[in-house]
Image (cartoon, grey):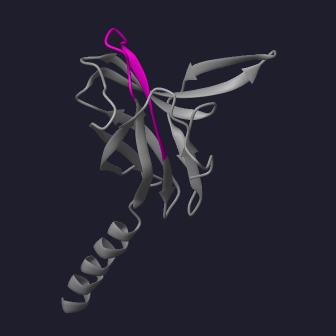
Amino acid sequence: MKKLMFAAVASCAIAGAAAAQVSVSAPWVRATVPVQKSSGAFMVLRSAHPARLVEVRSPVAASVELHQSQMKGGMMSMEEVDGIDLPAGQDVNLASGGYHVMLVGLKRQLKEGETVPLTLVVESAQHKRENVTVQASVKPIGYAPASAGH
């Protein structure tokens, strides 16, 4: 009986360790002008295990979408995607010109110096979901990070 109990506890510990374990660095959101209804959110994600960013939520927007910008036929285009893969142990940079988060239907102006709460929903390879809460700094409209990679 003790061996069975130990095996059950050990398997739960291993399953818990297999959760996505996502870290977020340098999260920020672009400031807006008073009538603007959308903005972008950017950050660097790293997952200890293979995972996928499947959703983002924020109380400042009516909806939040995952997008990818890419060159098509000599023109930059932006499309909504259903998720963003997070390979194990690799940085995934959500930035202008690539994958990023769009805050759509803003409920108010986003002003430099504020913070915006974001809840990232990450799905593990075992289809378990984990919420990661982030406070993203609102940066000036013309802000560009010092390093494109981080």
Q: Position of residue 91 (x, y in %)?
A: 57, 55
Quadrant placement of the N terminus: bottom left
Residue 6 part of the magenta-drawn span: no
Q: Is 33 positioned to the left or the right of 116 in the image?
A: right
| Residue 74 visible in the shown view | yes
The residue positioned 58% from the left and 32% from the top of the image is 96
**Number of numbered discs visible in the structure rendering:** 0
Q: What stretch of residues is rendered in magenta?
A: 31-43
As drawn, which residue projects farthest toward the right?
A: 74
Q: Is 71 positioned to the left or the right of 20 in the image?
A: right
Asked if 24 appears above or below 99 in the picture, the reply is: below
Residue 34 part of the magenta-drawn span: yes
Asked if 70 appears above or below 36 in the picture, the reply is: below
As drawn, which residue projects farthest toward the top?
A: 35
Q: Position of residue 43 (x, y in %)?
A: 47, 45
Q: Is 76 positioned to the left or the right of 126 in the image?
A: right
The residue positioned 43% from the left and 38% from the top of the image is 54
The residue positioned 38% from the left and 61% from the top of the image is 19
